[in-house]
Image: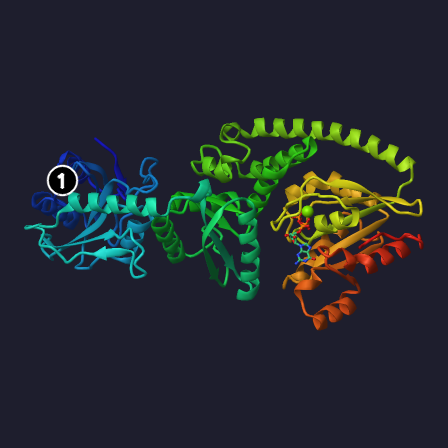
Amino acid sequence: MRKIYGHTTGLKTSQLRRLDKLYRRRIPSELIISPELAREVCQLSHDIRRQIGLMVDRQGKVTYVIAGDHHKIFIPNVRNLRAAPGRLMGLRCVHTHLKSEILTQDDLTDLVLLRLDLMAAITLKPDGFPDQLWAAHLLPRDTSERPYQMLAPENPYQPIFPCLETIQALEAEMAHQQARHAPREGRERTLLVSVTTASRRRAQASLRELAQLAESAGLDVVDTVLQQRERVDPRLVLGQGKLKDLAIAAMQKNIALLVFDQELNSSQIRSLTDRIELKVIDRTQLILDIFAQRARTREGKLQVELAQLNYLLPRLVAKNTAMSRLTGGIGGRGPGETKLEINRRRVRERIARLEHSLRQVQKQRKQQRARRSKRRLPVISIIGYTNAGKSTLLNALTHSDVQAENRLFATLDPSSRRLRFPQDLEVIITDTVGFIRDLPRELMAAFRATLEELENADLLLHVIDISNPQYEAHVRAVERILADLGLENIKTIRVLNKQDRIDAETRSRLVRTLDGVALSATQRPSLRPLIARMATALSADQLTVDCD
Ligand SMILES: Nc1nc2c(ncn2[C@@H]2O[C@H](COP(=O)(O)OP(=O)(O)OP(=O)(O)O)[C@@H](O)[C@H]2O)c(=O)[nH]1
Ligand SMILES: [Mg+2]
C-alpha cells in the first residue's frame, strides 16, 4: 500500500484501501479531474466525513493522496514538492469540500505559496455526489489586482476547462516575465523586508539604511515591504497574509533574495524557507557579506570568516534544506556551500584554526606597533559612522588618495598616513572601518583587536555626517561602540562633516549642540578650524597645515 498523507488516524482498513486505490487512477491530462474519479473521491469523502485531496501531475497521474479533516487538508511538506524558479510546481491539487463552500483563503494561500499548477475543490451534495467544481490558477503578470484567477464553477460531469493547455500557457507567461525582469549585471533581485513593533518612521529610516547596505553589497533592490505588528511572530516573523503577498511579488518580479531588517534565528529562517521559494538572509548576514567582499588584508579576511562562522554555527541545523540557501550568502559568496555542508564539529575546528592564525597576525602587528611607538609619534584616529566621510577627511588632511566612495563600508582595512608639519611635528593619522547601528556581535568580536588598537590613539576625530537626518542615532551608535571598547576616555573632537549640504542656521545650531567643528572634508580650506583644534588638543600650538 502507498502512503496516505495527512489525517489518517481512525480510518478503517477498508477505507484506507479505497484511498490507496486512488493512486491507480489516471486523469486525461486535458481535464482537471475525470467525472468518474470526481464521483469516487466524493463518495469516499462523504463516507469518511473528511476532505480528500489529490495531487495530480501533468500526465494526469495521482502522486499524493491526502486525507484531511472536516474543514481542510494539509498539503504535506515533502522534499520534492518544490517549484523550480520561474516555474509552477508541476502538480495541481484537487480536493473535496464537504459543504458547498467555494475555495477558501487557505486554499488560495496554498496555491500562491506552493505555486501549484491549479487549486480545485469539488463540493459535495448532501447525498455525497459531486455538486460543483471550483478552481483557481495563478496570474504570473503583475495586475495590481488579485494574483490569481477564479474560474467559473463547472459541472464535474461535463468538464470543459482546458487544464493542461492553460498551465502551459501560464508557464510560458512566467518565462516571459522572468526574461523581462532578468537580473542586471548579475545583481540579485532583492526584496527588503522590515517587520516592526516600533514607529513607522523609525522603521523607514532603518530600511533606507538597509537599502544602502544592499546597494553596497551589489544587490538590486526591487521592492521594500514594511509591516507594523503588535508583536513579531516568533515563528514566521511576519503574518501569513503578508508572506503570501511576498511570495506573489517574488514570483511576479523574479526576486531571488529576501533581506530582513532584523536578526532572524535559525527556526525563523527554516520556517520561512520552508514556505517560500527564496533565499532569506538578515541584516547581520548582509553586513557580514559586505565585509567578506571588501576584506583585502590577511587579517581582515581572517576576521570576516571568523565572524561569518560564528554567526552560522548556532544556525547550523542537521539536514535542514534551508541551510544551503542560508549559507550560500549573496551570490554564493558566503563561507561557501561545500564548507557549510560540513557539520558543526568541522566548523568549530575551523573557528579554532582561524582564531589561532588571527592571534599570530595580531602578534606581528603588535610588534610593529611597538616599534612605531618607540619613535613616539602621536596617533590621531578618524572614527565615525559608515559613510560619514572619514576617508575623505584623511585624504584632505594628508593629500593622499585612500578610496572614498558613496557606499557603506567603503573602507574595511585601516590605513595610516603620516601628517608632517612644517614645525618638525609629525603625527600618524589612521582611517578606520566605519561603525554602524547594531554592529553584529560576531563582527565586533572578530574586529575587537583591530578596534582596540584605537586605544593607542592620542586623539580621536569622530566624523559625523550632519547632512544625514539620522545623525543623532549615528552619534549614539558610535559612542556606544566606543564605550563597549573602553575607549570613551580618549580625547575626542567631533567633526561635523558635509556642512555644504545644510543651511547656515542649522550648521551653527549643531556646532553648539554637538560641540563640534563644522567643515566639508571635500573643501580643504574649511579644514582650518579643525587643524587649530587638533593642535590645541595635542598641545602643539604651532601646528599649521597648508590648506590652500
Ligand atoms: N557633500 C559632501 N560629501 C562628502 C563630504 N565628505 C565626504 N563626502 C562624500 O561622502 C561619501 C563617503 O565618504 P567616505 O570618505 O568614503 O566615507 P567613510 O566615512 O570613509 O565611509 P566608509 O569607509 O564607507 O565607512 C563620499 O561619496 C564622499 O565624497 C563633504 O564634506 N560634503
Ligand atoms: Mg572610508
Measuring from the top left, give residue 235's x and y in whole percent: 46, 50
| Image side of residue 238 versus residue 540, left or right | left
Q: Position of residue 321 (x, y in %)?
A: 42, 36
Q: Is mark 1 within 8 Å of ligand 1?
A: no
**Amino acid at the residue labelled 1:** Ser
- Name above or below for residue 446 compared with residue 103: above
In the visual, does 410 lie left or right of 276? right
Q: Quadrant of residue 492?
A: bottom right
User: Which quarter of the image is occupied by the C terminus?
Assistant: bottom right
**Residue 209, image x, y percentages:** 57, 55
How many callouts does the rendering have? 1
The scheme the figure's colours follow is rainbow
**Is any part of residue 312 visible from this angle?**
yes
Query: Crowdedness of circle 1 by 10 Å Cα count: few (<14), some, many (20+)?
Result: some
Left or right relative to 43: residue 507: right
Under circle 1, the secondary element is: loop
Q: From this viewpoint, which residue is outermost toward the front?
A: 548
Which residue is most to the bottom? Answer: 505
* Residue at point 58%, 29% (across, down): 347
Looking at the picture, does residue 513 appear above or below residue 141? below
Where does label 1 land, which residue?
29
Nearer to us in this view, 453 or 543: 543
Image coordinates of residue 181 in percent, x first then y, are 37, 47
For the N terminus, the quadrant is top left
